[in-house]
Image (cartoon, grey):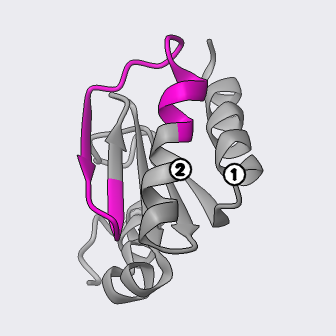
Amino acid sequence: MEFQQRLDNIVKVLDMNKAESIEVFDLQGKNYFVDFAIIATSLGQKHTLALLDHLKKDLKPAERFNFVDESGDWVVVDLGDILIHIMTSEYRVKYDIESFLDSLKDGLDGEAL
């Protein structure tokens, strides 16, 4: 399965299950350990974990979940070449990983942070 189809499937699952502010970052060739990162905002802690369950149910067996780090506020799913972050709005604002990923995407290698 090609990247775009995989990304579309992930975004579709998140969107269908009420994730908000879904962003996809193309980091291919940008000196980062994955090719793509996806960030989505959940409606709260229970919703964060529910979104993880939806991803597991809807993406397996096509996707291999290498590692999942989960808490109610922030879930990280490592698919090898795609990293998915699902965060509550408070955590998304607090950690602002979009700025870091944008700096990589823009070729700054995180130096501006």
Q: In the shown orientation, is residue 86 left or right of residue 111?
A: right
Residue 1 percent across, percent down from the top left: 62, 12
Magenta span:
54-75
Residue kind at label 2, given as amino acid type:
Leu
Residue that appears at 62% across and 27% down: 6
Q: Nearer the viewer, residue 61 or 9?
A: 61
The alpha-carbon separation of the residues under discs 1 and 2 comes to: 7 Å
Residue kind at label 1, given as amino acid type:
Asn
Point out the image quarter for the C terminus.
bottom left
Label number found at residue 17: 1
Q: Is residue 90 above or below residue 78?
A: below
Q: Please, what secondary structure does the residue beneath circle 1 have? A: loop
Residue that appears at 62% across and 38% down: 10
Residue identifier under label 2: 51
Residue 38 percent across, percent down from the top left: 51, 52
Q: In the shown orientation, is residue 29 left or right of residue 67?
A: right
Residue 110 percent across, percent down from the top left: 27, 71
Q: Is residue 24 above or below residue 55?
A: below
How many other residues sit within 10 Å of disc 1, few (<14), some (14-19) or many (≥20)? some
Residue that appears at 37% across and 30% down: 79
Q: Is residue 108 above or below residue 38?
A: below
Q: Nearer the viewer, residue 113 or 96?
A: 96
Residue that appears at 55% across and 69% down: 41
